Image (cartoon, rainbow, N blue to C red):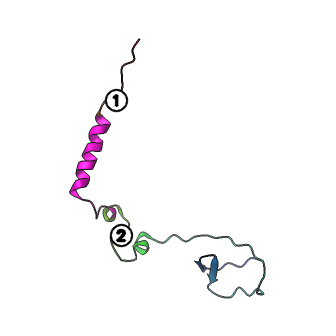
Amino acid sequence: MEIVMQGVIHGQTVELERSPGLDDGSVVQVVLNVERPSPAARSGGAGPPATAAGMMANYTEDDDAVLEEIHRDRGRDTRREIEP
């Protein structure tokens, strides 16, 4: 028999939306299909949304200096000549 319903996990316990109609202590197999919330739901309305612009909300001028240093380091020639 297959019964499909939704529930909420609390630690190792799954609280089902309604009674499955099985006897207490019945052995069952559980398959979890996790519903992924939308970015707006993940942020919960608090703080910036989970978007590229939202992730840049805490961007500071110091970040420019760090990114510029990384860019310079990537442009440096780090190869050495091999001696014969």
Name the residue at 67% across, 78% down: 4
Q: On the rendered structure, is 35 left or right of 82? A: right
Q: What stretch is highlighted in magenta?
A: 55-75
Farthest left residue in view: 61
Say which of 72 and 20 sits in front: 72
Q: Mark 1 points at which residue?
A: 78
Q: What residue type is labelled 1?
A: Thr
Callout 1 secondary element: loop
Q: Which amino acid does label 2 sit on?
A: Pro
Say which of 5 and 15 sits in front: 15
Q: Which disc is residue 20 wearing?
A: none
Closer to the observer: label 1 or label 2? 1
Q: Where is residue 66 in the image (x, y as percent from the top left)?
A: 27, 49
Disc 1 vs disc 2: Cβ atoms closer than 8 Å?
A: no
Name the residue at 31% across, 29% down: 77
Q: Residues within 10 Å of mark 1 (few under 14, many from 20)?
A: few
Q: Name the residue under label 2.
A: 49
Name the residue at 34% across, 29% down: 78
Taking the magenta stretch, the answer to whether it contains residue 72 is: yes
Taking the magenta stretch, the answer to whether it contains residue 66 is: yes
Q: Position of residue 61 (x, y in %)?
A: 21, 56
Q: On the rendered structure, is 69 left or right of 23? A: left
Q: On the rendered structure, is 33 left or right of 58? A: right
Farthest front residue in view: 83
| Tally of numbered discs | 2
Say which of 11 and 14 sits in front: 11
